[in-house]
Image (spheres, rainbow, N blue to C red):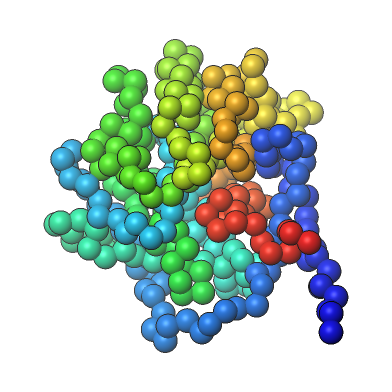
Amino acid sequence: MATTPPPPRPEFTDPNVIRAGAPATPTVVLGPAPAPGPAPAPAPPQTLAAGVMVGKLGHNETLKLPNVKPIVLFVGPHNVGKTAVLASLIGYSKDATAEGGPRRHQHEWVVMDNIVDSPDTSYQNKAKELISELGDNKVFVGSTNDYFVFSVHHRHRPAFIALEAPGEHYYDKNKKELFWPLYLRSIVNRVQRKVYLFIFSDDLLSGDRNDREAYDTQVASFISNKLKRGRDKFCLVYTKVNTDPALKGRLTPSEIAKRAFSKDGIFPRTGEQFQSSPIKDRRIIAYTGGTFGKNDQTGNEDWAPPPAEYPGALMEAILTMVRGRPWWKFW
């Protein structure tokens, strides 16, 4: 007997996501996941409290990452806000899990073992520091020698690997070179599926016009020459949109991000490659990593996470690129 398919799940329109070839206000789904499959393994993975691997690598060392899941790379120069983007995603995942948020977005960020030849004993200390800072809404800034490696799990099963590395490793402004250390170049050259989150901001590289243009050229060239159709996907994440000078006008965050990558914007070459790239499902995302402020009592800088719609939209974009669209999007 034929059955009637269930109605589509509720959707919301996110003004901060712009897909290639789509209207400026596409629909992003943040609904619950379909019914669970087979029961997970009885022993759950290590939870977020020890879920980050922080370390230091020599220039001739590489990371021993498994090939079975996609790698999501948070790419950007020093001080662009990569760690704040990462921290906001971790916090959002925790909240979605603890407060009954969208099940599709409920993830555990867990430690990966045995990915370096000589593990640094500071890994767990750094992990506790990161989680403590997030729990206290304090800003966490990775040093120029630190990288962060997560295995991100959904329902106790690995979904993807997340890698955030020093900005000086992702881009050397003196060499004008992307991914220059061996461990990053080896990841770029792997046949493994990858998602590149190219992170930009209005104050990128301290707002120096020449440095910004050089970086724009390098990212555009990388998109054109290095990304492989069918293997790689990418997003242009325009962060710090909450402090962008253009916000004083009547532009929405998505319009500000779109303008930044337009012909007359501050990153026109990257925008041109975004428009012409044969890679499907690429997108521009307006973002904020949160709000920062000086605590007069402690003298430290505190951090308030961004509104949930920002990490929610970015998490949905990542999941769509690594796992595909939710099943209810096909009705």
Residue at figure coordinates x 76%, y 26% from the top left:
249
In the rendering, at what x and y percent does residue 1 appear? 84, 84
Considering the image in quadrants, where does the C terminus appear? Answer: bottom right
Looking at this view, is 204 or 264 the one in front? 264
Q: Residue 79, located in which quarter of the rendered image? A: top left
Is 322 above or below relative to 152?
A: above
Residue extending farthest front:
1
Total marks shown come to 0
Residue at figure coordinates x 66%, y 61% from the top left:
326
Residue at figure coordinates x 20%, y 56% from the top left:
116
Looking at this view, is 279 or 172 the one in front? 279
Residue at figure coordinates x 34%, y 52% from the top left:
148
Q: Residue 98, located in which quarter of the rendered image? A: bottom right
In the rendering, at what x and y percent does residue 295 appear? 49, 48
Residue extending farthest top:
210
Q: Is residue 137 visible?
A: no
In the rendering, at what x and y percent does residue 177 appear? 33, 24
Is 196 above or below relative to 32?
A: above
Is 264 above or below relative to 317?
A: above
In the rendering, at what x and y percent does residue 130 appear? 38, 58
Left/right placement of residue 141 relative to residue 85 reads left
Q: Is residue 30 visible?
A: yes
Is 194 above or below relative to 201?
A: below
Left/right placement of residue 182 relative to residue 279 reads left
